[in-house]
Image: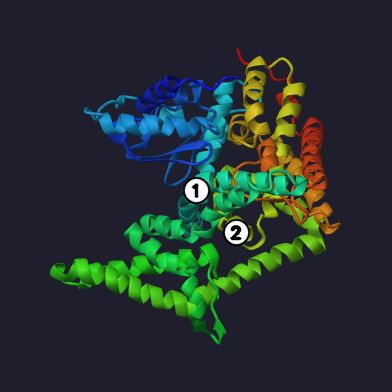
C-alpha cells in the first residue's frame, strides 16, 4: 500500500483545524508516536462528532492538559508540521465555528445509554462520557505530575525508536557475522543519542517546568561528562552517566527553581550575567555532590527490582502487569513509565517490561475479534472493529478501547484478562531463562518485533516467546470475551439503523 501524498496530509490538517475551534483556539501543538496533542483555550468549541467521523482520525483521547487526536504511526508525524504551518500562517484567528452549540448537548452520561445502543456514534459518545468521568476522578496532583513527566519524555520517542531499530539491526548483523566493517558504524549511530539522552531530558524538563531549556540542558550535561570521573562523592568516584535520565531530570528541575529564584532577586541590570551563572553553578554543584549519587542508587534499584521480580515471580508479575496496563493506557498514564523503560535501556541495553506490557494490546485485539464474531448483525459496529483492528495489531489500541470495548463495558475487562495471560506467558519464560526485552520504547504489537532483544540478542527463542505471548493474549482475550464479555441484552439488541 502506498503512502498518502503530502497534499493528503495537508488536507487532513486543513480539515482538522476548524473542527478543534480554529487557530485562535489552539495554544500548543505536539505529537507522540500516534497522537496529535493539542492545548485548547475552549474545549467547548471542538466539534467532537465531526472530528471522530473524519477518515484520518482513529480516535480521540483527553487528559487534563491536552486534547489528543489519534492519527496513527507515520501519519501524525506528517500531519503535525502541516497543522503547525496552518497555525503560523493563519491571519484570521476566527477560523473555527464559535456557534458550535451548547457542549452539554454533545455529552451523555454512562447511564444514558443501554448496552443495546450499538451504533458506532452512540458507542463513541458513551466512550467519551466514560472517559470524561474517569478523568475527573483521576485529576489528582500525583497523576498530573506523572502526565508532566510524560510530556518530558514523549518528544524523545522517535529518536528512541530509530536508534533502537538500528541497534537491533547491528546486533543481528553481528550474530550473523555479516558486514563486519559496517557494524561499528551502526553501533555508533545507535549509541550516540543514548549517550547524550540526559542532555535532551534536561532541555525538555526545563521547558516543561517553566525554565530556560538550554540551562536545564547545561546542568544535565554534567551527568554524562567524562570529567566527573575525577570527582569523589560519598566516598567513591563518580562515573560518567551515573544516575542517568533520573539524575538529569532532578538536576534540570533544580536548575529551574534556582533560575526562578534568581529572576525574582537579581537586579535586571545584572540578570543576563548572574542568573545563568548562579543557576549552572548551584544546580551543578548539587548535581555532582548529591544528585548523581542518589539517582544512581535509585536507577540501580530499578534494574535490580525488575530483574528480581521477573526471575523469581515472572509468571505472576507478568500476569499482573499485562492485566493492569490497559487501564493505564485508557487514562493516558502509560507514558509515565517511559523514565523506567529508559533507565533499563541505559543499564541493560533493553527494557524487559515493555514486551510484557505490550500483551495488553493483544488482549484488546482478541476481545474486539470476539465482539466482531458474536454481534454478526450489527454491521456498523463490525465496520468500526474492522477498520480499527489493523491499528490494534500494530499496537495502537485507542480506537478499539474508546470505540468498542470501553463503551460496551465487559469487553474491556475481558481484554484485560487476555493481556494478563499474555503477560504471564512472557513472564514465565523469563523465569525459565529466556529474556525478552526491547531496545526502544513506543511500538508494541507486531511493530515491536524489529526492536526485540534479550540476553542472547535477537535470537529465534526471543522472537518465538514474544510471538507466543501475543498469540496467548489474542486467544485468551477472544475466549474470555466470547464466553463472558457480552450480556444477553447486548446480544439480543436490535442493530442500530
Could you tell me how far apart the alpha carbons at marks 2 and 1 are, in whole angstroms? Answer: 13 Å
178 to 100, vertically: above or below: below
Spot occupied by residue 382 in the image (x, y as percentages of width and height):
67, 20
Which residue lies under the disc numbered 2? 340
120 to 212, vertically: above or below: above
**Furthest residue toward right:** 432
Q: Is residue 90 left or right of residue 465?
A: left
234 to 361, vertically: above or below: below
Q: Secondary structure at mark 2?
A: helix
Can residue 410 be spotted in the picture?
no
Q: Residues within 10 Å of mark 1 (few under 14, many from 20)?
A: some
**Furthest residue toward left:** 269
Q: Residue at x 50, y 30 (%)?
A: 75
Q: Choose top left, top right, bottom left or bottom right for residue 97.
A: top left
- Between 443 and 356, the residue placed more toward the observer is 443
Q: Secondary structure at mark 1?
A: helix
Which mark, residue 154?
1
380 to 314, vertically: above or below: above
Q: Is residue 429 left or right of residue 87?
A: right
Which mark, residue 457?
none
Q: Earlier in the sequence, mark 2 or mark 1?
A: 1
Spot occupied by residue 256 in the image (x, y as percentages of width and height):
35, 65
**Disc count in the image?**
2
Q: Residues within 10 Å of mark 2 (few under 14, many from 20)?
A: some
Spot occupied by residue 93 in the image (x, y as percentages of width and height):
24, 30
Q: Is residue 399 left or right of residue 174?
A: left
Q: Residue at x 72, y 14 (%)?
A: 377
**Furthest residue toward front:** 181
Placement of the N terminus among the 4 image quadrants = top right
Placement of the C terminus among the 4 image quadrants = top right
Spot occupied by residue 306 in the image (x, y as percentages of width and height):
70, 62
Amino acid at each position: 500500500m502506498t503512502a498518502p501524498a503530502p497534499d493528503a496530509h495537508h488536507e487532513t490538517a486543513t480539515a482538522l483545524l476548524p473542527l478543534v475551534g480554529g487557530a485562535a483556539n489552539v495554544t500548543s501543538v505536539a505529537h507522540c508516536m500516534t497522537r496529535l496533542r493539542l492545548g485548547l483555550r475552549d474545549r467547548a468549541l471542538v466539534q467532537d462528532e465531526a472530528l471522530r467521523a473524519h477518515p484520518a482520525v482513529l480516535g480521540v483521547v483527553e487528559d487534563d492538559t491536552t486534547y489528543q487526536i489519534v492519527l496513527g504511526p507515520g501519519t501524525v508525524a506528517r500531519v503535525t508540521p502541516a497543522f503547525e504551518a496552518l497555525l503560523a500562517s493563519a491571519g484570521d484567528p476566527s477560523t473555527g465555528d464559535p456557534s458550535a452549540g451548547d457542549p452539554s448537548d454533545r455529552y451523555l452520561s454512562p447511564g444514558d445509554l443501554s448496552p443495546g445502543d450499538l451504533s458506532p456514534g452512540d458507542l463513541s459518545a458513551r466512550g467519551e462520557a466514560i472517559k470524561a468521568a474517569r478523568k475527573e476522578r483521576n485529576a489528582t496532583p500525583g497523576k498530573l505530575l506523572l502526565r508532566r513527566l510524560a510530556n518530558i519524555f514523549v518528544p524523545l520517542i522517535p529518536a528512541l525508536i530509530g536508534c533502537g531499530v538500528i541497534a537491533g539491526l547491528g546486533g543481528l548483523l553481528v550474530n550473523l557475522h555479516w558486514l563486519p566493517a559496517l557494524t561499528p558504524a551502526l553501533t555508533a549511530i545507535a549509541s550516540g543519542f543514548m549517550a547524550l539522552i540526559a542532555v535532551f531530558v534536561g532541555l525538555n524538563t526545563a521547558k516543561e517546568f517553566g525554565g530556560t531549556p538550554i540551562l536545564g540542558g547545561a546542568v544535565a550535561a554534567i551527568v554524562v561528562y567524562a570529567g566527573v570521573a575525577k570527582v569523589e562523592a560519598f566516598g567513591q568516584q563518580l562515573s560518567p552517566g551515573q544516575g542517568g535520565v533520573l539524575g538529569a531530570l532532578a538536576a534540570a528541575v533544580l536548575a529551574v527553581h534556582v533560575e526562578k529564584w534568581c529572576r525574582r532577586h537579581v537586579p535586571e541590570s545584572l540578570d543576563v550575567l548572574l542568573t545563568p551563572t548562579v543557576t549552572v553553578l548551584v544546580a551543578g554543584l548539587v548535581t555532582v555532590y548529591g544528585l548523581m549519587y542518589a539517582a544512581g542508587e535509585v536507577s540501580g534499584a530499578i534494574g535490580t527490582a525488575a530483574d528480581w521480580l521477573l526471575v523469581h515471580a515472572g509468571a505472576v508479575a507478568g500476569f499482573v502487569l499485562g492485566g493492569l496496563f490497559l487501564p493505564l493506557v485508557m487514562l493516558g498514564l502509560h507514558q509515565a513509565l517511559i523514565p523506567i523503560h529508559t533507565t533499563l535501556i541505559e543499564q541493560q541495553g533493553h527494557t524487559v517490561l515493555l514486551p510484557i506490557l505490550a500483551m495488553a494490546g493483544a488482549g484488546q485485539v482478541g476481545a474486539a475479534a470476539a465482539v466482531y464474531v458474536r454481534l454478526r448483525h450489527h454491521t456498523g459496529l463490525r465496520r468500526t472493529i474492522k477498520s480499527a483492528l489493523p491499528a490494534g495489531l500494530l499496537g495502537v489500541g485507542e480506537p478499539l478501547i474508546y470505540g468498542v470495548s470501553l463503551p460496551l463495558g465487559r469487553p474491556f475487562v475481558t481484554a484485560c484478562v487476555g493481556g494478563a495471560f499474555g503477560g504471564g506467558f512472557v513472564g514465565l519464560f523469563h523465569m525459565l531463562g529466556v529474556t525478552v526485552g526491547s531496545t526502544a520504547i513506543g511500538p508494541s504489537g507486531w511493530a515491536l518485533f524489529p526492536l526485540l532483544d534479550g540476553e542472547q540478542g535477537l535470537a529465534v527463542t526471543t522472537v518465538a516467546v514474544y510471538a507466543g505471548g501475543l498469540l496467548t493474549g489474542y486467544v485468551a482475550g477472544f475466549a474470555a470475551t466470547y464466553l463472558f464479555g457480552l450480556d444477553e441484552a447486548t446480544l439480543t439488541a436490535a442493530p442500530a439503523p
